[in-house]
């Protein structure tokens, strides 16, 4: 899902800094696809708190990670790093 969102935003020049923030566990194919489209992948340690911090520090407009059987994603306007597990 993150890849689809990132590629769409890159194609429309709507992804700030062309950056997608993901955890160190994300798939290498995602990185290749984003970079081939002209974007960049920024990797952080695992955890939504780390993803958000990476987004804020790098001015990224999209980030997320797989969490168990689901995926979480965020944009700076949506995220507040208030996940109970990240405190």
Image: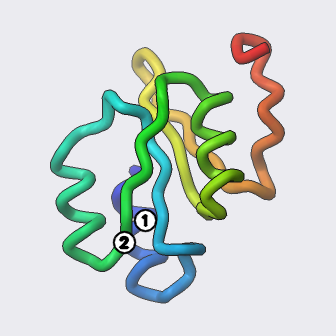
Left/right placement of residue 16 relative to residue 78 reads left
**Image quadrant in which you'd find residue 50:** top right
* Above/below status of 76 relative to 8: above
What whole-number distance in Å separates the C-alpha atoms at marks 1 and 2? 8 Å
Q: How is the image coloured?
A: rainbow
User: Is disc 1 in contact with disc 2, using a CB cutoff of under 8 Å?
Assistant: yes
Indicate which disc residue 6 carries.
Answer: 1
- Residue that badge 2 annotates: 39
Q: Residue placed at 63% from the left, 51% from the top?
A: 55
Q: Residue placed at 80% from the left, 57% from the top?
A: 77
Q: Nearer the viewer, residue 17 or 4?
A: 17
Q: Secondary structure at mark 1?
A: helix
Taking the view exactly as shown, the residue that stands out farthest to the front is: 57
The image position of residue 10, as x and y in percent, is: 42, 78
Q: Secondary structure at mark 2?
A: loop
The image position of residue 21, as x and y in percent, is: 49, 49
**Image quadrant in which you'd find residue 33:** bottom left
* Above/below status of 50 relative to 12: above
């Amino acid at each position: 899902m993150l890849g689809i969102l990132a590629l769409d935003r890159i194609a429309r020049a709507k992804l700030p800094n062309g950056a997608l923030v993901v955890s160190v566990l994300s798939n290498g194919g995602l990185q290749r696809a984003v970079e081939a489209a002209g974007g960049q992948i920024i990797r952080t340690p695992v955890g939504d708190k780390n993803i958000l911090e990476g987004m804020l520090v790098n001015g990224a407009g999209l980030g997320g990670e797989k969490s168990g059987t689901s995926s979480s994603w965020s944009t700076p306007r949506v995220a507040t790093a208030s996940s109970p597990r990240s405190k």
